[in-house]
Structures are given as C-alpha cells and as structure tokens.
Image: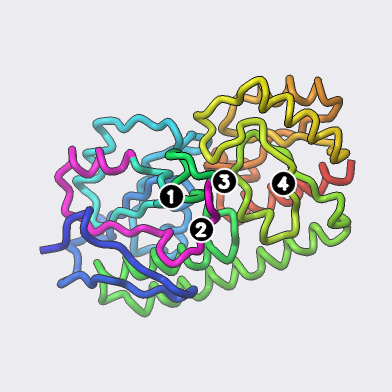
Amino acid sequence: MAPTAASISTASNNTSGAATTAATNSAVTSTTGKIKVLATTTQLGDFARNIGGDRVEVTTILRPDDDPHDYDPTADDSKNAAAAQLIVKNGVGTDDWLDKIITNSGTKAPLIDTSEGIKLRAGNGSDEEKQGDPHIWHSTDNAKIMVANVAKGLTQVDPTNKEYYQSQLTAYQKQLDDLKAQITQIFAPVPVEKRKLVTNHDAFGYFTDEFQITVVGSVIPSFSDAAQPTPQEINELIKNIKDNNVKVIFTETTINPKIAEQVAGAAGVKIYSNLYGDALGAPGTDGDTYLKMELSNAKNMAAGFQQ
C-alpha cells in the first residue's frame, strides 16, 4: 500500500534531489492511463506538467491569480485529493491548508514537499514567518531543486517511467538555466545602484538575491499579503522611497493595489502593474507559465528601474 500523504516527502541537497522514501509498487493509473497529480499552486502544476509530460494528468488546487495566503479549501479539493496518486506542495507555510484537505479526503497518495533541499531565507522571527520565506520558486536555482523533487515523486509512484521523467527533468532544468541567462541579460543594462525594488508584499527576496536587486521595502512588510501595514510602517516606507530615490512601486496580480497607489501618491512615484508574485497568470497572459512569469517580472522590473 502507498504511504499516506502525511508520511512521505523528498529531500534534495542538489538539483538532482534524493528521495527519503520509495513507493513499494507502481501506482494504479487513472482511466486515461496517466498518473493523477494534485498540485497546490499554479506554478507547481506547471512544474508537474513539464516533468510529467504525457504521462500525467495534473490538477491544481489554486487557480491563476489566486492568493495562497488566505485560501479556504473546498469540498472539490478533498475529492481531487482522494482521487490523486501523487500530491505536490510548496511547503514553508504557503499551503498549510493542505493538511485539512488531506485529513478530510482520507487520501493515501504520497506527498512531495518541493522545498526539501532548499536553503530558506529567514523571516522576521514572528510566528507568521517562523518557517522562513515561502516564495522559493522566484529563484531559478531553487526551481531546479523543486522540479527535481517532483521528478523523484513521479518516479516513486511510477518507477517504470523513471527514464522518461529523468529525461524531462534534464530538459526542463536546461530551460531554467537558459531563463537565468536571459534574465541576467535583461538586467545587464541597469546599473546595480538603480535596481531598487518596492512591491506590494515581501515576495521577491529569492529573485532579488539572485539578480543583485536591493529591496527597499514593501507596502505589506510581510511574507504574507494577508497582513496589514500600520500607519507607522507606511510612513517609514514613504521615507525610505524618497531617501533611496526610488522611482516606481510594483504591484502584483493577486493583491489589491489600493494601498500601493496611495503610497505612490504620497511618495511622488509611479505604479508599475502586474508582477506575478504568488500565482501564474490566466491562460493567454504573459505569465501563464513559470518561465513566462519570471521573464515578464524581469522585464517589468528592468523597465521600472530605469525610470
């Protein structure tokens, strides 16, 4: 029998990953002949589709532009979990609501935590941030570890297709390397001293670390956009924007821009819309896949920095 969803994860110390537990036998496939994968977020769904290819049928709990920080599980989520043969989560507190879904569904599907093996950015010490920064996917290096964990999970439940998943993994990790090179080139014309970022909430720390960007602040000074800034925090942010000669505040697709617009008005700076922070965009947008999402973010940031 497959382990319960709460009892299995993958561990990865490099981009190839290392599974802590192996499935004892191959999963029984769905009526389509494909492995049924349930992913918590849109970006994880995209990872699973790229690694699983035509061997998987992927469902995501969150939809494009959904906010994971205040998600309330539905009865359909439990049904999808009960039918799944593999469940993939982000971890680091992003999708803690998955625990309720697993309990309600009674699923026995293996659970893959894609954060395993990733060096986390520290939080501010509060209960809300005690696990660290959950926005791990905004680093292409982290993404390579995450997809390796997905490949390990698929191999656990479908070992007969191990070579296929490894081939898919190798090809996608190459795309991630290419993406990093593209983003590096996008920022190349922007002097490092002009790469100053202010966003809706503190979601881009891994990205800024990877591409030499200074975070001046965020409208919501928290990893979670469910938090609310105090008047003192708003006034401090306005001062920091002026002191650092910041020209633009970037808003995100999943967050109401009202407070950011008020801060921009008080600070005398522009608003740049539509960074993809916590979710992919709707089909047909420039953020409807992980690769497009990160490329779009880089282009928008580079344009804003040069105002």
Identify which residue is drawn at 28% across, 71% down: 20
| Foreground pick, 138 / 159 | 138
Is 199 in the magenta?
no
Which residue is tagged 3?
288
In the figure, is residue 140 to the left or right of 39?
Answer: right
Label 4 vs 1, first from the N-terminus? 1
Q: Nearer the viewer, mark 3 or mark 4?
A: 4
Q: Residue furthest left?
A: 1
Q: Nearer the viewer, mark 3 or mark 2?
A: 2
Q: Tell me the kind of residue under disc 3.
A: Asp
Q: Residue furthest bottom?
A: 163
Identify which residue is drawn at 61% across, 31% down: 220
Q: Which residues are magenta?
A: 97-123
Using the numbered discs, state the Cα–Cα distance from disc 2 to disc 1 in whole angstroms: 8 Å
Q: Tell me the kind of residue under disc 2.
A: Leu
Would you say the residues marked 3 and 1 are in contact, meaning their CB atoms lie under 8 Å apart? no
Q: Tell me the kind of residue under disc 1.
A: Gln
Which residue is tagged 2?
120
Would you say the residues marked 4 and 1 are in contact, meaning their CB atoms lie under 8 Å apart? no
Secondary structure beneath label 4 = strand
The x, y position of residue 74, in whole percent, is 29, 30
Q: Which mark is residue 131?
A: 1
Which residue is tagged 4?
215
The x, y position of residue 27, in whole percent, is 19, 64
